[in-house]
Image (spheres, grey):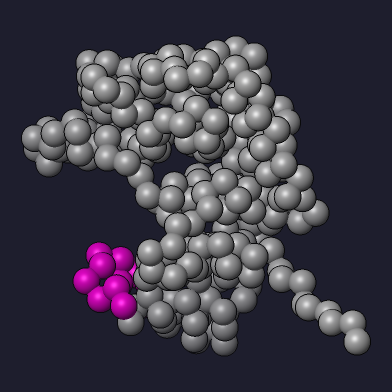
Amino acid sequence: MTLSYPVPTPLEYFASLVQVGQGEAIALLEAAACIAHDAHPNMDVQAFLDEMDRLQARLARRMPADAEPLLRLNVLNRFFYGELGFGANLNDFYAPENSYLHLVLGTRRGIPISLAVLWLELAQGAADLKAYGVSFPGHFLVKVLLPGGQAVLDPVTGHSLSREALGERLAPFRAHEGASAQEDVPLGLYLQAASTRDILARMLRNLKEIHRTRQDWNALVAVQHRLIMLLPDAWDEWRDRGLAYAELGQPLLALEDLEAYLAHATGASDVPAIARHVKALRAAG
């Protein structure tokens, strides 16, 4: 007897990667690659992972035996930025394609966080470095722990950033948030290693902002599905999916999400506005 198993949908596949048991690690590269399925449903994740494995093997052949971490970092960066030619897509920085890893791998062009995910895979693999993502305000960074301290790098160029340079990058964020609230926060708190879940959420929220700016509500809803799978208790994501459903003329789905938000976000400043929105949807229905 031939056994057949249902093929998971792209969303079910993503859910299987991010809804892991306590203590289990999320496979960052695979989960991040799956984000592209909403726009490219036929994207072959395994083919992408195989190509990354081939890059790992190429890099491993360039690593001197018993090399110190700093030398391994230099070899990695020459390979990633020099030989492979990865860098920012300055011609179309806000294109959704910059977040789709299989396309970034093919074009060698992306945004800081997508370049960082590919770089981190090589850094933690063939380069055997203690490397981590850093969810820095405005520009995703990476850091490497070295015997003499840590190096913080821009994943777009591989250049190391001094404390002064990091302070300059942080200044606009502090000004926007209000100096009184931010100026006493130590720089080191902004350089904490980001969790895999945090990295995936930031990738998805980048896409969310692009789709919202373009008023592409179908694409926005697809991103919201993944955000809610990833962060089921992030009730603002339920709210934003509900608002997108309302834009699509789907009041029942909108009400379900917006009412869930109101039930859990009782102290939020926008509760009165969302409550009025719910009342209007009910009246229209």
Q: Quadrant of the C terminus?
A: bottom right
Along the line of sight, the residue nearer the viewer: 100 or 74: 74
Please tell me which residue is depicted at 24% across the width and 19% down the height of the picture: 148
Front-lying residue, 99 or 196: 196
Residue pushed farthest front? Answer: 66
Question: Residue 81, image x and y in percent?
Answer: 57, 17
Q: In which quarter of the image is residue 260?
A: bottom left
Q: In the figure, 92 relative to 242: above or below?
A: above
Q: Which residue shows up at 40% across the image and 33% down it?
A: 131
Instruction: Determine whether, in the image, residue 167 is placed left or right of residue 8.
Output: left
> x, y percentage for residue 160?
36, 16
Magenta segment includes 274: yes
> What x and y, as percent, mark residue 107?
71, 27
Which residue is nearer to you in this view: 118 or 213?
Answer: 118
Residue 195, compared with residue 143, is above or below; it is below
Residue 185 included in the magenta stretch of the image: no
Query: Where in the figure is residue 69, as x and y percent of width and height?
Result: 39, 21
- Looking at the rendered image, the quarter that the N terminus falls into is bottom right
Kindly tell me whether residue 270 is visible in this rendering: yes
Q: Which residue is drawn at 69% across and 63% down?
A: 10
Magenta span? 264-275
| Residue 133 found in image quarter | top left
